Amino acid sequence: MKRIRIFRHIACEGPGYLGDFLDRQQVPWELICVDADRPVPARVDDVSGLVFMGAAVSVNDPLPWLEAELRLIRRAHEAGLPMMGICFGGQLISKALGGQVTRGEGMEIGWYPLYRLASHDQEGWLEGLPVEFETFHWHADTFSMPPGSQPLLMSECYRNQGFVLGDHLGMQFHLEMTEEMVEAWIMRYGSDLKLDSCCIQSAKTIKEDLKGRIARLHRISDVIYGNWLKRVRQREAELAKR
């Protein structure tokens, strides 16, 4: 199987548990550290999938590498290469494929439930998950549904939490978190917790039963990552037959 290429935009928002999941599945992967000035590879025929991680910036900012990633996403879409976007990464995919990214009414930070839009999940992307489940959030922007996509999830604070388009999955929330990442984000981005929003939890609340919450989050991660990886493998198998 060809490797999966993961794009990191800031050191503290790396693949986290996603890397552990891929290792367990014996899936090769590589990390492109855009934050360390690594160039954005333009090829899409040397990998089995692309993953775009979070960032502490907006996809609407004048970033020197942004256009290269947007072009890559469009190229991958044309080639039918599966992609997954996490928070900023989901916003990237939305913008590249015709959606819009705008500021939300207030930041959403902490542990909040997501609600399945079951009528839209006709291809079983969320198969194996309950109607409501808790994930981790830390974002200020929101994406619209790119043309042709289907919404999957919503929260009380943000209407658009996930979409699928072909074999692409865009998520506003974070499945990759580890205990260490949560602690690091609180240290680095702690000033966000003082902002005025009804959807921001305190550091104390975020860290309550952290080990248990992370364990439950990873069970959700296994299902969603697994359903995406199944599509990656199906495409690889189909290409191998040609």
Image (cartoon, rainbow, N blue to C red):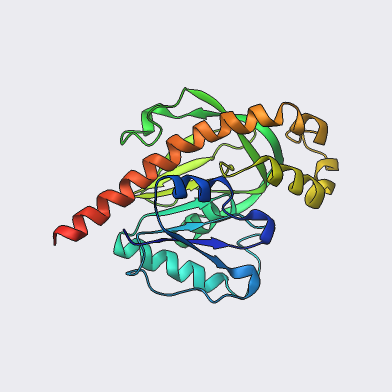
The quarter of the picture where residue 43 lies is bottom left
Vertical side of 137 occupied by 44: above or below: below
Quarter in which the N terminus is drawn: bottom left
Rendered position, 49 above or below 199: below
Residue 210 occupies which quadrant of the picture?
Answer: top right
If the image is split into quadrants, where does the C terminus sit? bottom left
> Please, is residue 68 above or below residue 203 in the view?
below
Specify whether residue 129 is in view: yes
Seen at 34% across and 50% down, the residue is 167
Number of marks in picture: 0
* x then y, percent, for residue 240: 19, 60
In the image, residue 63 lies at what x, y percent? 64, 71
Name the residue located 59 percent from the left edge and 31 percent from the top edge. Answer: 215
Q: Position of residue 226 (x, y in %)?
A: 40, 40
Q: Give how far across and how far down residue 46 sits, in percent.
A: 34, 69
Name the residue at 44% across, 38% down.
224
Residue drawn 39% across and 50% down? 26
Of all residues, the one furthest to the left in this rendering is 242
The residue at the far top in this view is: 131
Task: Decide: is 172 above or below 117.
Answer: below
Whether residue 57 is visible here, answered yes or no, is no
Residue 42, picture quadrant: bottom left
